[in-house]
Amino acid sequence: MTTILHNPAAAEVSDIDRSARCSLSFLIFSALGWLVAGGVLALLNLIQVHTPSFLADCAWFSYGRLQALQETALFYGWTVNAGLAVGLWLLIRLGGAPIRGANYVGVGAVFWNLGLTLGLVGIAAGEMTSFSLLQLPSHIQPLMLVAFAACGAPGVLAWTGRRAESTYATQWYVVAALFLFPWFFSVAQVMLLFAPVRGVLQNAVAAWYGQNLLSIFLAPLAIAVLYYIVPKIKGQVLPTYDFAIYGFWSLVLFGSWTGGRHLIGGPVPAWIPTIAIAAAALLLFHHIIVALNLRGVFSTEGNVVLKFAAAGFAGYLLTGIGDAVFAMRGPAVVTHFTFFQQAQLQLALASFTLIVFAGLYYLVPRLFGAAWPSAGLVRAHYLASLLGFVVLVASLAIAGWRQGVALNNAELSFVAIATQTRPWLQVATAAQALLVLGNLALLVHFVRILLSKPKAESAAQFHQPQALEASAS
């Protein structure tokens, strides 16, 4: 792909890349496999929403279990594997030394994905928990925690053993994600599963955990990718970079407090959703700072990596604005307990996914020393991802808004409400099918580059030193 490879900010293949090739390849392959599997499960789940008779006689694929299966596969299969792969590569690149403890990554990745597989079987068999985004059977979750710690340890070693004392925004965000995930994952396990708190406190803890997964794990990893690849590709220092530290700390401080917005109107103390509403508004400060730093990403100049990054970053900013607006009690009267909340969740997942796609398209050629085999597949994947996510989020949002308005009308029956939302859910189903096809194309493309031997002329394009390795990373 000439738009990716012939670039003044192309990085060299080095011992750093070779040292992590095997372990990161396994993480990426696992991530893409779960992305396709989770997409298929999400497709089946959407079909059941507007056609309840679909798979109604199969207990393993009833609606409640399919919903848990697709969420678990996408968030713990796709996002964690891909986030770890991209995050570890960024840390060792900026650390300036080959990866230490690569075997820990391999072993941890094997047990993480083994535990996830067993957990999905448990969910299908009816052993899931009742907490959204934490449905894995309780006996599987400690294994997942230890496996994640093993995968993250080399990242910590890359941070502590870096060759330069100065650090960069990319490193802050990745290290924060690696440290914070085990913290809130273990706290949620204790407070919800092994020594559960009582009554409505369970709802508060579950909402806190779900928001943490999005705001202080997935979001930092996505932003880390942008802070690295934007100056690399554009060949220039980020504007107002000195303010990046304020954007980082505002995300860490306020991101964890916004989960209570899902409890508006629920049987919880009024101060919990009130604090969440205020935190969602304060979190806009983070989005403003990051937008000032990364506004150059929207000047794509035909580069497909920047196109993915720009689309994902636009979704990230829209997610922050939407969370702040629809956390207010007025709009929440309409959007609460509707498909609109699913649209917000899908928007957050879409922004992370598109940004990580940009990261994968940037790092994989540098990991293997070979260009992506087909420029056409890359363009097809971009179009399928962009169109699929836009249509999916928009259709779910429209369906949710109409559903919320209708639910507030006592004269309308549930059958009439379902009739109003059904066409939009069918559109969402078509969009999800398009996403599955696009992600399958990426998986096939990655397998091709995994099995191919790099050509001498392709590998040579990555041997030029990187002028911006330290100054703007």
Image (cartoon, rainbow, N blue to C red):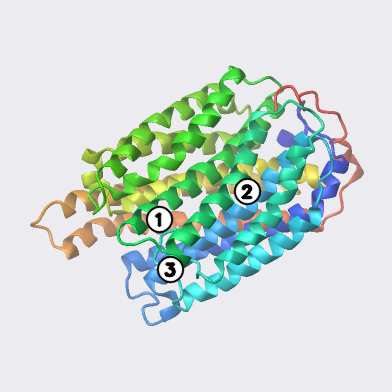
Asked if one can make out residue 387 in the rendered structure from this viewpoint, the answer is no
Residue 391, position in %: x, y?
A: 42, 47
Residue 459, position in %: x, y?
A: 87, 41
Q: Amino acid at mark 2?
A: Gly
Give the side of residue 406 with respect to residue 357, left or right. Answer: left
Residue 168, position in %: x, y?
A: 68, 28
Give the side of residue 58 with respect to residue 304, left or right. Answer: left
Mark 1 residue element: helix
Q: Nearer the N terminus, badge 3 or badge 2?
A: 2
Assign the N terminus to one quadrant of the image.
top right
How many residues crowd mark 2 within 10 Å: few (<14), some (14–19), many (20+)?
many
Q: Which residue is mark 3?
A: 129
The quadrant holding residue 303 is top right
How many residues crowd mark 3 within 10 Å: few (<14), some (14–19), many (20+)?
some
Task: State the CA–CA distance, disc 3 to disc 2.
Answer: 25 Å
Mark 2 residue element: helix
Q: Which residue is mark 2?
A: 83
Q: Nearer the N terminus, badge 2 or badge 1?
A: 2
How many residues crowd mark 1 within 10 Å: few (<14), some (14–19), many (20+)?
many
Mark 3 residue element: loop
Asked if one can make out residue 103 in the rendered structure from this viewpoint, the answer is yes
The quadrant holding residue 89 is top right
Residue displayed at 19% across by 48% down: 405
In front of the other: 193 or 123: 193
Task: State the CA–CA distance, disc 2 to disc 1.
Answer: 22 Å
Give the side of residue 338 with respect to residue 89, left or right. Answer: left
Q: Which residue is mark 1?
A: 206
Q: Mark 1 near mark 3, Cβ–Cβ under 8 Å?
A: no
Q: Amino acid at mark 3?
A: Thr
Q: Residue furthest right?
A: 456
